[in-house]
Amino acid sequence: MKTINKLLLSVAVAGICGTAVAKPVESDNEAWKAKFPNQYNSWATTAETGEVVDLLADDPNLVVLWAGYGFSKDYNRARGHYYAVTDVIQTLRTGGPMGDTDGPMPAACWSCKSPDVARMYEEVGEGAFNDKKFGAWGHEMGNAIGCADCHETGTPKLTLSRPYAERALEKVDMPFAEQSRSMKAAQTCAQCHVEYYFDKTDHNNVRFPWENGFTAEGAEQYFDSIGFADWTHKISKAPMLKAQHPEFETWATSVHAEMDVTCIDCHMPKVTNDQGRKFSQHNVGNVMRDNYEAVCASCHGDDKAEMEALIKSNKEAVNTEKLKAEEIIVRAHFEAGAAWDAGANEEEMKQALTHIRHAQWRWDFAIASHGVHVHNPSEALRLLASAQELGLKAQAELKKVLDKYGVAQPVAIPNIATKEAAQQVVGWDKAKLDAEKAEFIEERVKKEWKTDLR
Ligand code: HEC
Ligand code: HEC
Ligand code: HEC
Ligand code: HEC
């Protein structure tokens, strides 16, 4: 019976001319459930991480640091994979595109949200997908991050469903096909948990800036060399870089990576079900709640409370240095704003703005990497120290300009004590943004798109 099935399958896959024809990508997670119930059920519990935490309200400095850029409109803590599509639709960053060609965001914003992206790459091609705007594809995006993002359709076999990740890993001499089983598994996470940008010279395709390796400085040199900026800062007019969640990069330079302890070991360990069958636990969240005994204890001993205390103190240490860096860089933005207002010219401002760009990039690379206080706290602290130093250099340059134009110092910092106050200072019309989003959800998403909002 088994042989016959295999035969039938190989005929089906081989196609008419005997050349291999890939099966169409099955993006519907439900379709995998009957065959792989353990993996499906544990994947479905990523819905447990559903709490919405508003990070701009927690730390209004962020509104100023990202002034002029979407992240200062709205930025919440990452939720479980189950919410990925809902969250990208609902965030104010993606606006209210009522038509297929409306902005603000390009189609590539879907890249790390849904296995339907893998399906569409196959149906229309990566470049043709990314040539369009975010709003053009909503009706195709019905499934949150799931099976076909990491597996060949209908099988447990791991795959990179995102060709841009494959290209990037080849660039750093880590081609997927040649990796160990554990590194292949970690690379499935690296399709999304990385720093990236959209390459305007290549269909707005996703690209990882790994030309100079995985460090913040390497990426900074790369972005400088191609004259890239994500946006121009609203107050200081500095050409800014936004770091996205570089988990793979900060992990790759850590002690755990050196010891071949990967994302999968900690986030997806093998567990045993009621019938005694082993399977990989597919709820990637809640490492400390679920996995300490099975994963960490062999190296760190069985005192879980001690580890929790260490993680907490690492987190506090990172947070303290983060806030110090923010205070310095926020001040530099306002000082630069005051210098422009006083009549400074581009030549006089150039050095200070470059320092601001680099300071904020290093700060962002450290703090945008979720879980960095476990993954690589020493790297986070190193980057934050460097961000503080560069921020102070920016202030020193700005002092020369402010002195030259006779500007009274210290430059006054407006009230940025709350998210609302800070958003007024940087000029967002929050009521208008909310209204646009509400109309888009009611008139377009609920009527035309497949997603049930969660
Ligand atoms: C983010 C990536 C990712 C997603 C999403 C994902 N898997 Fe997995 N899956 C893995 C990794 C990594 C392994 C472990 C592979 C190994 O140990 O070599 C794995 C293992 C498996 C295995 C092999 C047996 C086992 O449990 O180790 C099956 C079957 C499987 N997954 C099915 C599914 C199904 C069904 C879904 C969707 C409901 C899914 N996976 C979603 C990454 C993923
Ligand atoms: C297709 C892109 C994609 C892949 C592949 C992916 N993630 Fe995610 N991950 C996301 C996005 C997007 C979010 C945030 C979702 C939200 O906030 O709605 C997220 C959130 C998370 C979170 C925080 C939420 C929680 O449940 O605690 C963890 C942890 C996580 N991912 C770990 C992993 C690991 C480990 C892997 C590899 C096995 C992986 N992810 C693979 C895109 C991805
Ligand atoms: C040594 C074990 C370990 C390794 C290796 C590891 N992680 Fe984590 N990770 C954790 C722990 C523990 C946390 C939770 C920290 C906390 O609760 O404060 C975490 C947190 C996270 C978060 C943030 C979740 C949140 O709630 O905000 C993400 C995302 C994440 N890890 C992804 C990854 C990815 C992707 C990799 C591989 C590139 C990886 N991790 C490697 C242990 C690990
Ligand atoms: C294969 C062994 C191994 C496993 C498994 C392992 N670790 Fe580690 N971990 C190490 C080593 C070695 C170090 C570096 C020496 C040290 O600080 O103890 C380390 C360091 C750490 C640090 C401190 C990093 C710093 O610089 O402050 C944390 C936090 C940590 N591990 C958490 C975890 C957690 C949580 C797990 C399980 C989810 C885990 N580790 C699993 C070996 C391991």
Image (cartoon, helix red, strand yellow):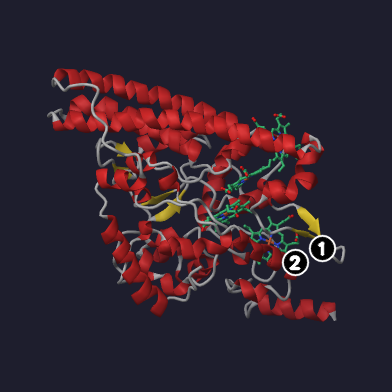
Q: Quadrant location of ligand 2? A: bottom right
The picture quadrant where one finds residue 18 is bottom right
Kind of residue at disc 1: Asn
x%, y% of residue 220? 42, 34
Residue sitting nearer the eye, 85 or 345: 85
| Residue density around tag 1, few if under 14, some if 14–19, many if 20 or more, within 10 Å | few
Residue sitting nearer the eye, 367 or 290: 290
Q: Compare marks 2 and 1 and give the one earlier in the sequence.
A: 2
- Disc number placed over residue 38 in the picture, else none: 2
x%, y% of residue 282? 69, 59
Residue sitting nearer the eye, 280 or 89: 89
- In the figure, 51 relative to 27: above or below? above
Q: Is residue 45 left or right of residue 64?
A: right
Cβ at disc 2 under 8 Å from ligand 1: yes
Residue at (47% x, 32% y) in the render? 322
Kind of residue at disc 2: Asn
